[in-house]
Amino acid sequence: MNALAALAAALLVLAALIYLLDRPAGSAWLLPAQWQARWQAWWPAPASGGWFGSAGLWLPSFVHAFAFSVLTAWLLPPRPALAATACAGWALVDTLAELGQHAAVSPHVAAAITALFGHSSAVLHTARYFSNGSFAAADIVAALAGSAVAFAATWWAISPQRARMCSLFPIGR
């Protein structure tokens, strides 16, 4: 499970690179626009249209759901039901976050966030995530796929049946 958590962390670095290199400066929620501009000046995108191509459009959604599902399951006791709960929870969070960016609801979501939580910098930043974001159905599909792959991987890592199978066939031990 530790190797899976390390993979999740490495994939989060990959997703950060997508935002640093392929997304417009100022478009990332947690990355300062100056960082994006500096990285893009150091490593300009290829003429073919970005370092990550069309995968750069949906890959961060896949990685976010996968990585946070795995990391949450890693922190919990190693039980398949808890891993399933972690993966389903992150699938729900990512799906709701994407739906909240839909033009039909994003102004209402942003207004509700500021009405409920005030006008601190963090709250306004969160509200802008919804009002300035762009909805993409592919991001929902990617997030659901990321959570499903995370569940399959965590199940394989913690499953008692797998442990019994590996003890019966000790290949490479």
Image (spheres, rainbow, N blue to C red):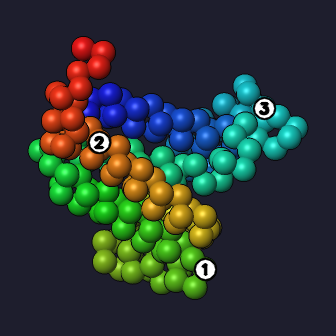
How far across and down, in percent of the image, does residue 27 sit?
A: 61, 53
Look at the numbered discs 1 and 3 and tell me whether their residues touch, using CB distance below 8 Å. no
Q: Find disc 2 in the rendering and name its residue.
A: 156
Q: Is residue 26 left or right of residue 108?
A: right
Residue for point 74% across, 44% down: 53
Q: Quadrant of the N terminus?
A: top left
Q: Find disc 3 in the rendering and name its residue.
A: 44
Give the amino acid type for the residue marked by disc 1 in the picture. Ala
Q: How many marks?
A: 3
Disc 1 crowd, CA 10 A, few/some/many (<14, 14-19, 20+): some
User: Quick one: label 1 or label 3, which is nearer the N terminus?
Assistant: 3
Asked if one can make out residue 51 in the rendered structure from this viewpoint, the answer is: yes
Number of the label disc, if any, that sits on residue 103: 1
Q: CA distance from mark 3 to mark 2?
A: 40 Å
Disc 3 crowd, CA 10 A, few/some/many (<14, 14-19, 20+): some
Secondary-structure class at tag 2: helix
Asked if one can make out residue 126 in the rendered structure from this viewpoint, the answer is: no
Number of the label disc, if any, that sits on residue 82: none
Give the amino acid type for the residue marked by disc 2 in the picture. Trp
Q: CA distance from mark 2 to mark 1?
A: 39 Å
Q: Quadrant of residue 51?
A: top right
Q: Is residue 2 left or right of residue 43?
A: left
How far across and down, in percent of the image, does residue 92 sit?
A: 36, 67
Q: CA distance from mark 1 to mark 3?
A: 31 Å
